[in-house]
Image (tube, rainbow, N blue to C red):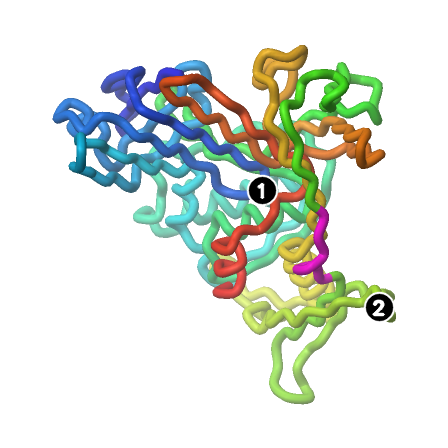
Amino acid sequence: MELYVFDLNFNRLGIIDDFESVKVERYYTKMGQLTMTIDGSKDNIDLLQKGRILAKTDDLQHGYLILTREYLDEQSSQLEIIAPSLNIMLRRRLIIGQQSFTGNIENVLKSFVAVNAVTPANPNRIIPGLTISTNHGINITATETDSNVLLDEFLYTVCNKHDLSWDVLLDVYNKRFIFDVWQGTDRSAEQHVNPHVIFSKDRENVLKQNYTESESDYKNVAIVAGEGEGNDRAYLTVNDQVSGFDRIEMFVDARDLQSTYQSENDVDITLTPVEYKDLLNERGKSKLTEYPKVVTFESDIDLYSNEVYGVDYFMGDKVSIKNDDLSLIMHTRIVSAIESTTQTGTSLQVDFGSNIPTLLDKLKRAVK
């Protein structure tokens, strides 16, 4: 693996090809990152400064912004780098006030990014060089509303609800960053348009598999409380038809959603009772996506098998995975790909299905 180093003006400053280890983590449903351990020489310290961008030489679209450096001087000097994906840029902006957009899902998400980071009313909120991609033709219509939340967290929540993902891509040649909404390609055995990608030990493309299914954190009914006080407060229940042992409730405080508010252009907007109920319903559905059933295969993939990552299949693609011992076949998305390179070689761990929430994920959810 080789890495280019760029500054925020897209100037290429150097190349990294001699390191102790590099791990590149990409996810469909949350922020990815690159971590690296390298010799703590003066040249490396000068090159790998905070605010610079790392990108694999064979994947210049996906950049990683250096935010953390740690210099360790023990038996030998080392420099440890932590660089989240360029999506971190949208964590630096809030959805200010109540904002709402309706239409094609790509246009809806791009509208939130435009008014908060590309063409906001306050020019100080512009993220330099950020542009919006052309649409891919995803055929989903939606109304999405939120207020006073981090822009990146809102985007992930909406995308998780609609089985989509998004990225801030690096366009070195045109010196710009591109916000893009996308959905992986269906390569599973369920369809007959694209070549099938199937993983199993029988096909000798999986080195090992760990299967996990859990409902310990699962919720399926959301009781949403909106504007008002006491007995006058607006309530709505999402999935109220679920009953008995199957019913697992959660409370959603949606007081921030108001039926009367000002748009981003300072226009007074008043929703009808039906429109306001739809708003609360969408908030409830969004929150339920944070508490899914976990069904996942954690698999170490043979890099030299009949299917090659980055050629035959990609992050976010829908594929088929079999385990004959469990008599199980899943047609599901690739939700993470972790590529680790050391001086002894490269390995690839791919997760199919639902991401298992980490403690940090649960703490962030509790804070929200």
- Residue 292 image point, x, y percent: 69, 53
- Residue 174 image point, x, y percent: 38, 19
Q: Which residue is mark 1?
A: 29
Q: Nearer the viewer, residue 97 or 357?
A: 357
321 relative to 126 in the view: left or right: right
303 relative to 43 in the view: left or right: right
Q: Which residue is mark 2?
A: 245
Q: Nearer the viewer, mark 1 or mark 2?
A: 2
User: Which amino acid does the dot numbered 1 rest on?
Assistant: Thr
Quarter of the image for residue 247 reads bottom right
Q: Secondary structure at mark 1?
A: loop
Q: Is residue 194 above or below residue 222?
A: above
175 relative to 110 in the view: left or right: left
- Residue 280 image point, x, y percent: 68, 66
User: Which amino acid does the dot numbered 2 rest on?
Assistant: Phe
Residue 135 visible in the shown view: no
